[in-house]
Amino acid sequence: MFSITLKLMKKSARMLIPAGIAILIGTAFIAATFLFGNAMNDALAAQNTAQLGGANYVISPDSGKDLTDKDQDYIYTRTVNDFQLDRIRATEGVKDARASYAGSVTVTRGNKHASSYVITTAAKRTLLPVTITQGDQPADSNEIALTKSVADQLGVKVGDRVTVNSQAAQYAGKTGDSAGNTGDAGDESAQNADGTSSHDGDSDAASGASVLSDGANTADSGMTVRVVGLTDDPNGAYAYYGGASVLSDNVITAMAGSNDFGNLPVYLVYLDIDDASDTAAASTVKQVSTLLPKHFSVQSRAALVEESVKSMSSGETSITTIFLLSFGILAMLVAALVIANTFQVLVAQRRRTLALLRTIGANKSQLYVSVLFEAGVLGLIASALGVGLGIGLMAALCQSGLMKATGMTMRLVLSGPVFTVPMAFGIIMTVIASLGSARSATAVTPLEALRPIELTDTRRAGVVRAVISVLLIVAGVALCAFSVWQMSENIAGRDSMADKQYPLVLLAAIIGCALIFLGLVLSATFWLPVLMRGVGAMVALAGPSAKVAHANIQKNPRRVAATGAALLIGVTLVSTIATGAASAKQTMNEALTTRYSVDMIAAGTDMTGKQASEAAKVKGVQRGIYAPTRMMTMKDADGKSLSVLVVGVDGVDALRKVVRSDLSGVTIDGDSVLMPKYSAATGKDIPLDKSVTFTAGAAEAQADAANGPSGNDANGSAENGNGQSGGTQTLTLKPRKVDYRRIASNYAAVAFVDASHFTNGGIKADGHIMLMRIDAEGAGVALNDVFTNVQNVFSASAGVTVTGPVAERTQWETMINGMMALLVGLIAVAVLIALVGVANTLSLSVIERTRESATLRAIGMTRGQLRRSLAVEALLLSLVSGVVGVVLGTLFGWLGSYMVFSLYGDTVFPFEWATNGVVLGVAALAALLASVAPARRAVKTPPVEALAEA
């Protein structure tokens, strides 16, 4: 029986090809997903261990031990001195040792600035995690090896001198406190004590500006160092930072705000041990271990690599793999509909052959197994080809170097699941999809061999299917309605489940949409043919070709429903994502507009008037004002201290040009200050007395450095009532409150005073701010271009940041567009398979209607008319299903947007004309292309020959 089945497959090979293509695409996607996960795991493991450089052993916190909080505190407060590096280097068998400490600095040459991540140096290049491409690594004092990108940015070459700064060093220089280190010793991306990985492998010094060093430089001028080399990061050890520069010990000490390298906090030390002999290496490790603080041990590089791979198995890459696999499974489910169609027609077309087999002795079970065996063989062949295609695509991706832009060098890593999972899934799905056809094969009786073949499907859809579909739709609608009701109650401020159990309410909405969609797909047999019949009746008026197409679609409603449902799945998902993305952008745009009163601001200590003038000329910047600022503190009516950015402006008229708020009836003079009604930090009303006193000076500067710009200054400043005393500036004014929002979100409040306070010496400016009103649409430019161009204007000033709703909106839209492109790209695989299904349906229809097509040709139908009839049939199948998918997707997208974005503001419910139009256009074009091959087959055979074959 199996040999007969294989012969039947060979005879029907052309009919099996479309189904095989559907399986191939789905399994290729699944195989590529596993390969991508393997490559990501391999790249991340290599990246995590790349910071070891040439080290073959690492001193790190003990792993696998139950450490108390006290033990953890002890571990992460160890310094370089605790590791006795001189004694370790002197130990027999130790070639070199490098304490791991890092941070961020600003590198300056002339009027150019660049940020760079910096790490400690080593006696030998091999122990560095970066490669010295030119020159040498720092060996003496006041030396730096710059990353090539920073050197190019600054126009620096080996032998030049640059200035380095950091916030920790600057703070230490101002306060005279050089003993404290503000580095974050817990920031790690090599192996931690528990074998997991986090951010980077070096203890992290504070980022930013400058240092008091050698008695020759001030805290503001930084430290001048000589460039002795250029570095590259080929292994991505510091890909997040664009590579790392190497500093000599005295410079990195100064950048950490310290005066002794031995006081720097470290918890990783990299070792280069002579391991030519395992016994000698073990002896060296044992000697080094006796020199270590408690809770530290020496671990081999091989052990670290193994732990890194283990950590990846339950890390972010597995989540990525599962996410991608969900789309692969979706593709296979759509493929199953195509496969089911194929086998239904195969069994129907072989009815006479199957009946003859029954006549010569084949029983029902043999026919049943024969169909399943055929499905299994098809699944095996197509899945194997799919796995090969997946491997080929992933190999091409790795060789192309496209992933290098992400800082990762990926390579092809084969594993068992790459082969077993896609092939098993492909075979199982193919066999499951053929079960219905196998049952149909067993219903064929020997007498049917004598009947003429009639492939028109006259079976009626089952009552059970109808009942289940209705129940699913009703349950889904009820869950969605409940979720919407709970959210509306929450928004109205009434008691609601969404207030305390929001995830459950959101989950109910998701399940509701899934149930509705599943119910519609199951009931497609009922409503989709009716819908196509109605549309086809109107199309039939266009001429004989359209009338034939309309009649053909009505002949097999079950197959029409299955083909339409396959396309419906993909289009609905694309439309849902597009609608959700559009709603997210528009809703968040509205929310940002209401939460900010200024479109865009630029602020910083080194902003210049020339830069402000250039920014005002940027196309899309409608108006702008440039003003001096001072960070000050004040106390509200409740005695709570707030950090306030005081801005000097030339009257309220200047402010009206850029602030989107009601400033009518408001004045700003020498005795008053304009204050916001609500705090940008808490959103709560700021209680004020009849007068407020702003304080700035040494105490304020110290408190601000400790608390951050948006924190509350608990220390405040001593007020002496005279306005100036002991280096402290005070200013007492009458407040006038107006509801303007988040001028600068880094501060609890932004207060506007008359500019004369800055010009007469009452307040000493420590920075400047530029407030801008943006009209990108009126200027005919993209909002993103305005933001980018303004950023470019201030690029020469490292301390200037550009923020505001325009900036946040640009970043938000970039993120949304990126996610949408990824998801739509993944779902496109399912749409592609569905369109293969359209081609499959047309091909099978042509094969079934060989006699009918011949008869039409014999009575005068031209080849062109026959081609047009198939094109119209394809368009009806794709466009009707596509339009239904767009409607469903839009409704689902609106519901999802309301459930998520109503928390942030008034939800916008857009219809994404562009994306939906593109989807329908692609579906129509693909359908027309899908009709070409079947049409060629239909018109190729002469009518007399076709009638003889039928």
Image (tube, rainbow, N blue to C red):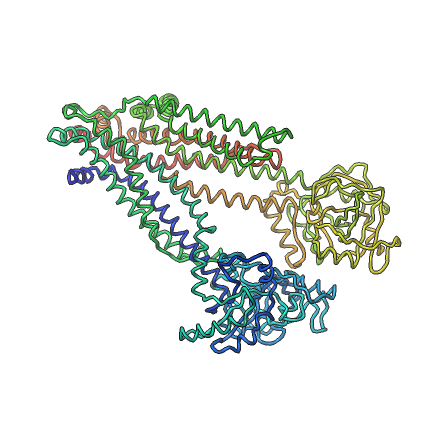
As drawn, the residue found furthest toward the left would be: 360
Q: Is residue 683 left or right of residue 4?
A: right
Give the image location of residue 670, x and y in percent: 86, 47
For this rendering, which residue is in front, 713 or 447? 713
Q: Is residue 227 left or right of residue 571?
A: right
Residue 781 appears anywhere in the view: no
- Count of marks, rendered view: 0
Q: Is residue 342 left or right of residue 944?
A: right
Picture coordinates of residue 107, whole percent (x, y):
63, 65
Which percent across, then down, holds residue 852?
A: 23, 26
Residue 70 relative to residue 344: left or right: right
Q: Residue at x 58, y 31 (%)?
A: 497
The image quadrant where one finds the N terminus is top left
Q: Which residue, as the protein is rendered here, is positioned at the far right?
A: 722
Quadrant of the image occupied by residue 23 = top left
The C terminus: image quadrant: top left
x and y percent of residue 99 in the render?
56, 69
Residue drawn where x is 52% and y is 36% of the image: 580
Residue 658: image quadrant is: top right
Q: Is residue 470 above or below residue 928?
A: above
Name above or below for residue 476 compared with residue 59: above
Q: Is residue 612 visible?
A: yes
Q: Nearer the viewer, residue 326 or 949?
A: 326
Q: Nearer the viewer, residue 48 or 871?
A: 48
